[in-house]
Image: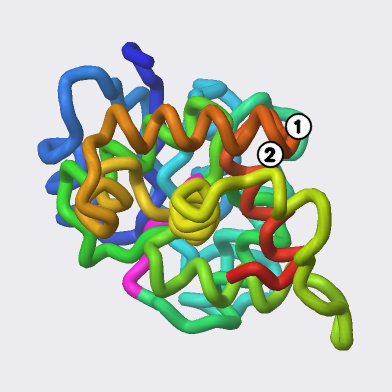
Amino acid sequence: MTGIRVVIVDDHSIFRSGLRHDLDASIAVVGEAADVPSAIEAITRAAPDVVLLDVHLPGGSGTGGDGAGGEEVIRGCAGVPTRFLALSVSDAAEDVVRVIRAGARGYITKGSSGAEVARAVHTVAEGDAVFSPRLAGFVLDAFGAVAGETAAGGDELDRLSAREQEVMRLIARGYAYKEVAAELFISIKTVETHVSAVLRKLQLSSRHELTVWASQRRLL
């Protein structure tokens, strides 16, 4: 997907400038903001494809300075057809879960490289969810099956080969195709083939649905 329009929301101008420089040519920055009110205004005005959103922002009602304003931005833009990708220095479980509950489609840390951020932007723009591998566990714990529900071992899982199950688990945890290929010592093309087969056999339409499916069955 090319020509992705993004708005960067972060209260540090140096970080915004550096991120703008690091994003690839297929991503156009159409706005920036440093606090909750200006973020809502910029996003509403530009209606970008993706918003790169810091979790902790000043200017939110009741947040008291550098509070958890990211979720307020998401809720304040409920009528805007955009997707939110949280990009934060924090990897605390409560921050991850809070912003995902508010409606973000992904969460990566500021330790990510420019190339990693660009890939995440493309993934979210295409409608899939993306998380740094370690952070995916927080989301799965928070949105997984209720206590006492056992892992599925019946007909649905039996539809998948052993290799397809390996690929399914890694993809559901937020790994990129390239990372899955490296982990399993197979080609990216083979990963793509396995993912297509998994989605077809489970009658799912996206990686996001696959993550939900796997977490509900405690397969991760």
In the image, 79: left or right of 119?
right
Vertical relation: 2 (above or below) 136: above
Q: Amino acid type of disc 1?
A: Gln
In the image, 179: left or right of 129?
left
Instruction: Report crowding for label 1: few under 14, some 14 to 19, many 20 or more residues within 10 A (C-alpha).
Output: few
Q: Is mark 1 on a helix, strand or loop?
A: loop
The boundaries of the magenta stretch are: 85-89
The residues tagged by marks 1 and 2 sit, at their Cα atoms, a distance apart of 32 Å
Confirm whether residue 105 shows in the render: yes
Judging by the rendered image, the residue that carries numbered circle 1 is 203
Vertical relation: 218 (above or below) 173: below
Mark 1 or mark 2: which comes first in sequence? 2
Vertical relation: 197 (above or below) 214: above
Name the residue: 29% across, 21% down. Answer: 28
Name the residue: 39% across, 76% down. Answer: 90
Location of residue 201 in the rendering, given as x and y in whole percent from the top left corner: 69, 34
Judging by the rendered image, the residue that carries numbered circle 2 is 77
In the image, 137: left or right of 61?
left
Query: Could you say which is closer to the camera, residue 168 or residue 24?
Result: 168
The label on residue 2 is none
